[in-house]
Amino acid sequence: MGVTVSFDLTTDQVQDALRYTRTGLFANWVRGMADKGVALIAPRLAGPTTLELSEAGVRISTGAGVQELGWADVATVNERQQGWVIQQRPRGVTFIPASAVAAEERAALSQQLRAWVGAKYKVREGGLAAPVGVTG
């Protein structure tokens, strides 16, 4: 089974979707560092994007070009409140906003990603929630 997801996010939408939301003793300190990192990568993740996901890996098409990753090139797939964050090896990231996937198809995509990446699939911040302010 292959899955194709297309979306077009602004830099602000990317920053909102990837914002660190945990609370706790060191949360403000971590949030400050995380926000700086997101500010650096958000412009690269913004704009028209198409991800083709398959058993072989991910093909990412943006205005900057096409990148192909096998699942071995993926460090983790993090299911977060606003979507899925795919962390690449040795570095790099791509994002699938939940709003780009029909609500009734999100569970199936999560299940398929788990099947492809196994233990590299992590649920963060409670997992998927209804998107707020992020449109596909």
Image: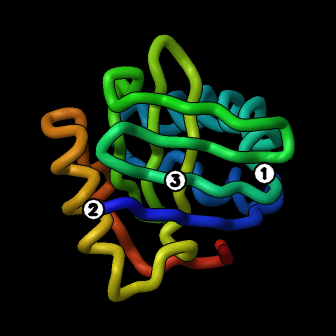
| Location of mark 3 (residue) | 52
Q: Is residue 6 left or right of residue 101?
A: right
Percent position of residue 33, x then y: 61, 26
Q: In which quarter of the image is the N terminus?
A: bottom left
Percent position of residue 46, x then y: 78, 51
| Location of mark 2 (residue) | 110
| Location of mark 1 (residue) | 46
Percent position of residue 86, x then y: 45, 40
Q: Which residue is drawn at 48% across and 29% down?
A: 69
Question: Would you place residue 19 above or below residue 112 in this image?
Answer: above
Q: Determine contact: label 1, label 3, CB under 8 Å.
A: no
Foreground pick, 95 / 14: 95
Tag 2: amino acid: Ser
Q: In which quarter of the image is residue 93?
A: top right
Foreground pick, 88 / 19: 88
Q: Which of marks 2 and 1 is nearer the N terminus?
A: 1
Q: Quadrant of residue 74?
A: top left
